[in-house]
Image (cartoon, grey):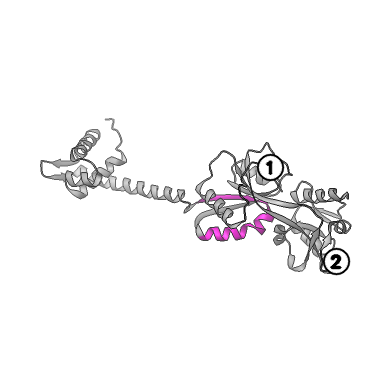
Amino acid sequence: MERTNPSLADFNAVLVLLRCGSFRAAAEVLALSPSSLSRQITGLETRLGARLFDRDTRNVAPTASGLAFGRVAERMVNTAEDGMAEFEAHLSARNGRLTIAGLPSVTAGLLPGLLRSFSAGHPAIDLRIVDALSGSVIEAVEAGVAEIGFTAGTLSARSRLTFQPLMDDHFVAVGAPDGPLRDARAYAWEELVEMPFIAMAQGTSVRELIDGACLRIGHALAPRFEVAHLATAGALVAEGLGITALPTLTLPVLRTEALVQREITGFGARRRIGLVWRSGQSLSPSAQAFLTHVRQRLAVRSGAQWVSDGSSGPPV
């Protein structure tokens, strides 16, 4: 015989009636009239093809089928309540999962402190970090591998991502203590480009800003070494093979305890750090909570959320 599955309201009505022992008391708990509750139980019995309660004008007693159904109803209601509690925790960002993509310089220099404070307030959110070079951060967010990403620069006008600027990262000169930067003073950019220079590879935002700074002074950069990874640049500098210029957020990737940092004058550019996420798609509660946390922890300029017009170079 074909039956219509009971609703959660049916399961709950049977449980309350079992506990209260009368239609009047159960109806008060359920905010129904006794006649409405009676019709609901009668309809359920008809659909099930089984009598759940024996009743007369004064008494209500569960049948064997009613007791069996009550045990099923308790499991169903408890499961539903547990499920809603889990969903409410998701909505309130008490638990969940969040994947964040980021440039190695950002994941090493900026992200650890943010994650520490965020995790303290959201200990049940599982966090996964994808550190990637160049356009891989953008690709990870566009493909949905990561929900949000830390990147540098701005975005192409064709991008389907929203860019939220967070901070500007200034450049410093880095060298060995006994090398060309041994004097504890500020160095003009014109001086630095004449020294043996270790440059990041073409296509990174660091290199594009370096090349832009050279263009402003009419001096083409002729690096002694070009490297793809920050740790390699730091190792070459530490060996006295040259100097480099890097944004301050990259410095934790280097062995800076063995190096000196000097202020640069006349560089004329800063690297903009920001967050990206897919435009037109709602962030998960976990991602929204993290974004709010980042905005609270960092000095974000008023009204800074926009989709870039593509006026700067690609991110690293």
Amino acid type of the residue that numbered disc 2 sits on in the rendered structure: Gly
Question: Residue at 19% across / 49% down in the picture?
Answer: 20
Count up the numbered dots.
2
Magenta region includes residue 93 = no
Please give the residue where the numbered disc 1 appears in the rendered image. 155
Please give the residue where the numbered disc 2 appears in the rendered image. 179
Q: For label 1, count other residues whose C-alpha is less than 10 Å away and answer few (under 14), some (14-19) or many (20+).
A: many
- Residue furthest toward the top? 1
State the residue in front, 138 or 216: 216
Cβ–Cβ under 8 Å for marks 1 and 2: no
Can the viewer see residue 17 in this picture?
no
Res 50 quadrant in image: top left
Image: magenta residue range: 96-120
**Which mark identifies residue 6?**
none
Magenta region includes residue 111 = yes
Question: Residue at 68% across / 45% down in the picture?
Answer: 136
Amino acid type of the residue that numbered disc 1 sits on in the rendered structure: Leu
Disc nearer the start of the sequence (1/2) = 1
Determine the secondary structure under disc 2.
Answer: loop
Q: Is residue 46 above or below residue 13?
A: above
Percent x, y of residue 78: 33, 49
- Residue furthest toward the front? 302
**Of discs 1 and 2, which sits in the foreground?**
1
